[in-house]
Image (cartoon, rainbow, N blue to C red):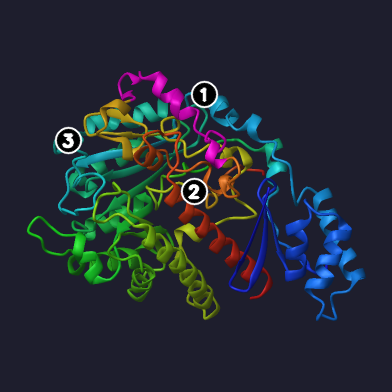
Amino acid sequence: MERIKTLNTRNLCESAKNGGCGECQTSCQSACKTSCGVANQQCEKAAK
Amino acid sequence: MVHQFQLNGCNIVVDTISGAIHAVDEVAYDIISRYQTDSREAITSWILSKYADREDVTEEDIQLCLDDVEELVRQGKLFTKDTYADIAGTLKARSGDVVKALCLHVAHTCNLNCSYCFASQGRFHGERALMSFEVGKQALDFLMDHSGSRHNLEVDFFGGEPLMNFDVVKQLVAYARSVEKERGKNFRFTLTTNGMLIDDDVIDFANREMSNVVLSLDGRKEVHDRLRVDYAGNGSYDKIVPKFQKLVQARGNAHYYMRGTFTHANPDFTKDVFHMADLGFTELSMEPVVCAPDDPAALTSEDIEIVKQEYEILAKDMLRRKKEGHPITFYHYMIDLEGGPCIYKRLSGCGSGTEYMAVTPWGDLYPCHQFVGDEAYKLGNVWDGVTNTNLREEFRACNAYARPECKDCWAKLYCSGGCAANAYHASGSIRGIYEPGCELFRKRMECAIMMKVKEAFEE
């Protein structure tokens, strides 16, 4: 594509099929403690 | 749902629902902006007229670009339909009453007297108190007993100042380590400290046992010492900075964060971030103050505009530093686009009140550290578990689709509906929103995404 470049990203729709193991870090349990965000968390599922 | 923005010379298109991110030129940017509302013919004629002076923008070229956009739509990477509302609550429902993280308030007292402290100088609007080993042990047992099949369990030693109860912290870690294997668990501990009591013993212990250490520093000496003072009114900067430097130097590659708060007094907080970098720290976090709108420290609407500009300055400078080989990390710009959380996590909210709870020195459970001291939000205690089940259900119902204000927000799968405590303090309801916080969050995500685009295509 000449005018469009797409970054490699995890397909969120696809992750609906095999996600949800719940092993990832609790959102606020780190450096912030005041403003929740989830985008910076690592997926901890053994086989994504 | 698509969000388009231009920042630092980049034209960026975010497809919220699929998570796809596209870096485009200005022609494609314009085409995408009208793709859903105008016909191909109308778009073609508009683009030809807008870029009449550009030889490279031909009718044939515009058709190719329109075909590319159509292909991305077909691949589910652009204008993806929002189909998540029905699964927004499923992870929490499936998880049942599993708890996997606790914030242990081992000390409701503090050796500093910071006026902006949301915890009221560590007392959380109550009496000064230290957690006993017995209460802490029961909290860890409660966590293991209620964690179901979860392997990784998180415990943050928090306060007040947790090092004012360091012996109990050490005993609790020793207890957890003695039982985690047989219970099939892996404890990840975090220590959040103001640094006043750091010594060689603390450094050795923290670097051996803590997965993460959060060190409170507000940046420049004059900024830090304005609010982070002892009970005699003396600033703490000169005492803590050398201790922090020693701890971080000894920590090797293990996680830590310098964590500051900025207020109305320093909306130009990037100077404080850069000051921390000058001190040799590389893992940095600065948070907007959480307080009542009439508090002198509260950020005003003028401050919010300054802060948004500051976020841009920070992002650009971080790119420069990385290019020059001495990068710094800013907590809110860490986004993992390829290995980040699945959609269930992104929908589920922060987990407060369900999988995450705070424990007071006397063993009461609250939905999170920010609700401690508010009796109406007491969930139960570490002996009887959660007894206020209606309250837990209210928190369980919080997710990225629980608030009407979030419905059309492009960033909802990055914040997952936001902080319940901020929403409560701003609107009186955990199902409300804190709009200035949302505004800053969206700006941070734009900056973080821009940095990813720059790194992927231009560096």
Q: Which of the pair B393/B190 is nearer the observer?
A: B393
Q: Is residue A17 above or below residue B47?
A: above
How much space separates mark 2 and mark 1, taking CA atoms?
22 Å
The numbered mark 3 sits on a residue in which chain?
B
Residue type for callout 3: Gly
Can residue B236 be seen here? The reply is yes
How much space separates mark 3 and mark 1, taking CA atoms?
32 Å
Question: Residue beneath label 1, please?
Answer: B96
Question: Residue beneath label 3, please?
Answer: B126
Using the rendered view, name the quadrant where residue B385 is placed. top left
Q: Which residue is drawn at 52% across and 53% down?
A: A40
Q: Are marks 2 and 1 in contact (CB under 8 Å)?
A: no
Can residue B65 be seen here? The reply is no
Q: Is residue B425 above or below residue B90?
A: below
Image quarter hosting the N terminus of chain A: bottom right
Residue B33 lies in the magenta-colored region: no
* Mark in the foreground, 2 or 1: 2
Q: Which residue is drawn at 67% across and 67% down?
A: B11
Task: Give me the disc on residue A37.
Answer: 2
Task: Write down the region rendered in magenta.
Answer: B379-406
Question: Which type of secondary structure does the marked residue at label 3 adopt?
Answer: loop
